[in-house]
Image (tube, rainbow, N blue to C red):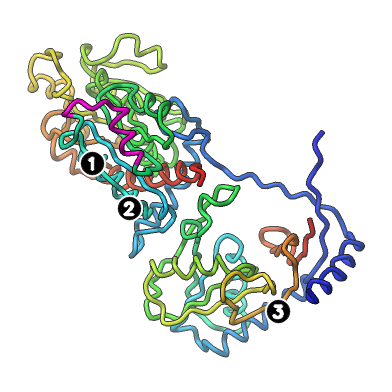
Amino acid sequence: MYKQHTMSQKVLLTSKEVHIILHRLACQLIENHLDFSKTVLIGLQPRGKYLAERIKQILESDYNISNIELGFLDITFFRDDFRRGEKPLEANKTQIDFLVEDKKVVFIDDVLYTGRSINAALTAIQSFGRPSEVELLTLIDRRFSRHLPIQPDYRGRQVDAINNEKVIVKWQENDGEDAVYLVTK
Amino acid sequence: MQIFGFLDVRNNYIRNQNIRTIRISKTMKELSVNHLIGIKYITKQDIDLIFETADHFKEVINRPIKKVPSLRDVTIANIFFENSTRTKLSFELAQKRLSADVMSFSAAQSSVKKGETLIDTVNNILAMKVDMVVMRHSSPGAAHFLSQNIGASVVNAGDGAHEHPTQALLDSFTIREKLGDVGGKKIVIVGDILHSRVALSNIFALQMQGAEVKVCGPKTLIPKYIESLGVTVEHNLRKALEWADVANMLRVQNERLDVSYFPTTREYTQQYGVTKELLDSLNKEIVIMHPGPINRGVEITSDVADSQQSVILEQVENGVAVRMAVIYLLASKIKN
């Protein structure tokens, strides 16, 4: 029998903490974007989708902002590690039914780590027009691990983690609970 | 160093907590082959993966800017020893949409005419550091032969009367898009089955996905023992169309007809040409496909080719997406 790959994990954020943070992030977005008439939200596939949907839901139900445009961007074909990684890259669905020309774009992703995904997203979004500006919202910002000069504009929680650790964000609708774990190999 | 000292303390704390142990396993999908020589060499899983990837590329080619940078460090040679318009343009466009460097070569303008062998021609091209070769050749097995003898990844764009895998994939992809699924559907392939690589690849692809396949045409243009592939044969076009959900109309390949297989083109049209009247007299609406080039007024009349029932131009659009998927998936297996 071969040895199973095992890991240990610790809770970084509980369900209650996640909810408080989501509301704060929504309020910070309102501060800068008011009625969202010139703003579009873009969830980055695969995991940023859930966060983006939650933020939109909070803005709509708790702050009565309607007509928020939300899209999902898959960056697989724009990644800079094609043919370099061990694993083949699997694509997800891109769904952007509007142009981002002259709009303020807010990228939404669960974890900001090396910054390479955001770099790819900045290239990918150009296929849908020229945004007037681009901002970044992340639930978790991993310090000390950036490969590129990219920082979030809206940050849920800053986390110190070393490279053999992994931050996993779980969502009720997909994983059965709202929580953030730090996993150690 | 101070930072990491701090992290170590914290991590030890976490390790000691050891709340619970979990196992993470991830299976990423990739093609089972390094070359696309024919449908008979790939699996149902490969076809599913190609279609899933093609769905994403179809969305890409409908964006305002239709290009992705994935293959910016990949060089592809398109080597066409036989005439082609659609397939060559479709492959070239697919490669350009993926940002690959492309060179195209037609045998008519090449040293092949001066007596150079296939291997020599291709090796000269590979010496220019090419990662992938897309080839069409008049000899069955040419693509297989090439894949055995060179280091680059090979995509068969048609080899004689053997296979034309990307055409069969885009045909199935179009059926899947139009009817939801290929499995359980009834497809009739009409026309010159004997000389058709499209027919052979389609038979393999459709059967692999669980469709029923019938071939229809004059006895002279149906290969003997084709039933051994698991298809049924029908010589009456009306009966075949009444049975089918989809009719794939093939061209009579006049350039390959070395002897007469039917008395006159006019007689062929009367027996095996699809007309609007014939389709309207059926008790259901069937999907009409054609791999092109169309001989209007021979196997299909203009009003059928341009009708709502025909998906001929959808096939062309899907061809680019499917070829992007094939090239992308094969390129991901080329190691740097």
Same subunit, labels 2 and 3: the answer reads: no
Q: A118 or B20: which is nearer to us? A: A118
Q: Is residue B292 left or right of residue A123?
A: left
Mark yes or no: residue A80 visible.
yes
Residue on which disc 2 sits: B96
Q: Which mark is residue B86?
A: 1
Badge 2 crowding class, 10 Å Cα cut-off, few under 14, some 14 to 19, many 20 or more, is: many
**Residue furthest out toward the top:** B224
Q: Earlier in the sequence, mark 1 or mark 2?
A: 1
| Mark 3 in CB contact with mark 1 (< 8 angstroms) | no
| Mark 2 in CB contact with mark 3 (< 8 angstroms) | no
Disc 1, SS: helix
Q: Chain of mark 3?
A: A
Residue at the image point whose x is 50% and y is 87% from the top: A35
Disc 3, SS: helix
Residue B112: x %, y % from top left: 20, 30
For the residues marked 1 and 2, what is the alpha-carbon distance in whole angstroms?
A: 15 Å
Task: Judge depth for marks 3 and 1 and give the one in front.
Answer: 1
Q: Disc 1 marks which amino acid?
A: Arg
> Does residue A137 lie above or below B130 as drawn?
below
Task: Judge depth for marks 1 and 2 and give the one in front.
Answer: 2
| Mark 1 in CB contact with mark 2 (< 8 angstroms) | no
Residue B170: x %, y % from top left: 35, 39
Residue on which disc 3 sits: A21
Residue at the image point whose x is 84% and y is 53% from the top: B21
Instruction: Residue B120: say if magenta.
Output: yes
The quadrant in which the N terminus of chain B is found is: bottom right
Find the magenta span and give its range: B113-127
Q: Chain of mark 1?
A: B
Numbered disc total = 3
Residue B149: x %, y % from top left: 41, 27
